[in-house]
Amino acid sequence: MPNGMILCTNSNLYQVKVENEIYQCLARGKFKKEEMTPLVGDYVEITVTHPENYEGVIEKILPRKNELKRPKMANLTTLLFVLSMKNPKPDLLLLDKQLAFASWIGIHSVICFNKTDLENPEKIEQIAQIYQKIGYPVIKTSAKKGLQVEELKPFLKNQITAFAGNSGVGKSTLLNYLFQKKLTQEGNVSKTQRGKNTTTSVTLYEYDQNSYIADTPGFSTFDISEIPKEELDKHFIEFVPYIQYCKYSGCSHIKEEDCAVKQAVEQGKIAKERYQNYQKIYQELKESEERKW
């Protein structure tokens, strides 16, 4: 049976790329019984039922490296987090949630600050430095004007990348620029500054050989409740060198004394903004766990 990758779904049909051909496939009924749904990004085995019409049936879903529940995708290698510098303003709490979640599921993170033409360069650099010092790649672009978008390309090579970020930050504009054609409709930012989401489903576009990019519906929230609060600190990667020096094993880095992480914040080794967001996210996870009981 030929192997392929699911590029997109439409109702009960799946577009599966097998070598250089695209097959329209149904999924076997056994997946429903097993409560398993084929996802965009899944590697699958198919049976070709009508070669002349490029039609087939998905027989088997191969083991996944990872899985995202929102957007529903599998086997991502890179998450490219897009923030706008203005209209809407950058949501750094959301970004820190996203970075922690990407670390949790083992996906490489790249940060893109878009609409840089609308903000003071010093302010942009101040925010960018927080994340560059940690070790995250940060690209500063203006997709509308085509500025620095080319700098994203090395991070997309031989990757399966999803563009993530709130509506209105310019994900679709970046995507259309990279492909030099209009793949998706670009949304306008509403008066509420939340943006108008125009992408309604996940689609993988082949950007280059072995390189795929997903345009995904905009996020207004980001659910990180899968991360146990006790493990959150390990996914704020700049905390990791200091955790072992905390006085108490299992230190939450919130109220404990002799906390090496809090000392690193006071010494300027960890950005206060990141630590404050850690506290908010930790509390959110704590409250979420308490609600379960």
Image: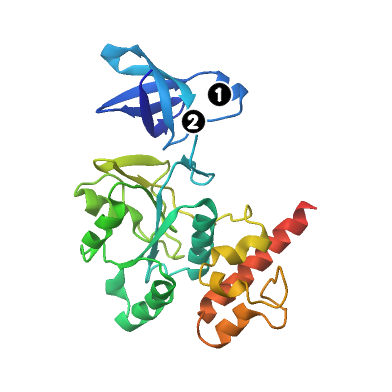
Residue at image point 66% right, 80% down: 259
Residue 61 seen anywhere in this rendered image of the structure: yes
Look at the picture and state if 290 lies above or below 282: above
- Of 244 and 59, which appears nearest the observer? 244
Residue 9 numbered mark, or none: none
The image shows a total of numbered marks equal to: 2
The residue indicated by pointer 1 is 31
Amino acid marked by disc 2: Pro
Residue 276 spot, x, y in % from top left: 58, 76
Q: Are marks 1 and 2 in contact (CB under 8 Å)?
A: yes
Look at the numbered disc 2 and give the secondary structure of its residue: loop
Q: Is residue 216 left or right of residue 284?
A: left
Q: Disc 2 designates what residue? A: 38
Whether residue 80 is situated above or below residue 121 in the rendered picture = above
When asked about the image quadrant of residue 84, the answer is bottom left
Q: Nearer the viewer, residue 3 or 190?
A: 3
Left-right relation of 221 to 135: right
Q: Position of residue 58 (x, y in %)?
A: 44, 21
Relative placement, left or right, of 107 versus 114 is: right
* Front residue (pair 16, 258): 258
**Residue under the image location 34 percent in, 79 percent down:** 125
In front of the other: 252 or 283: 252
- Regarding mark 1 in the picture, which secondary structure is present there? helix
Residue 114 appears in view:
no
Q: Classify the position of the N terminus by image quarter.
A: top left
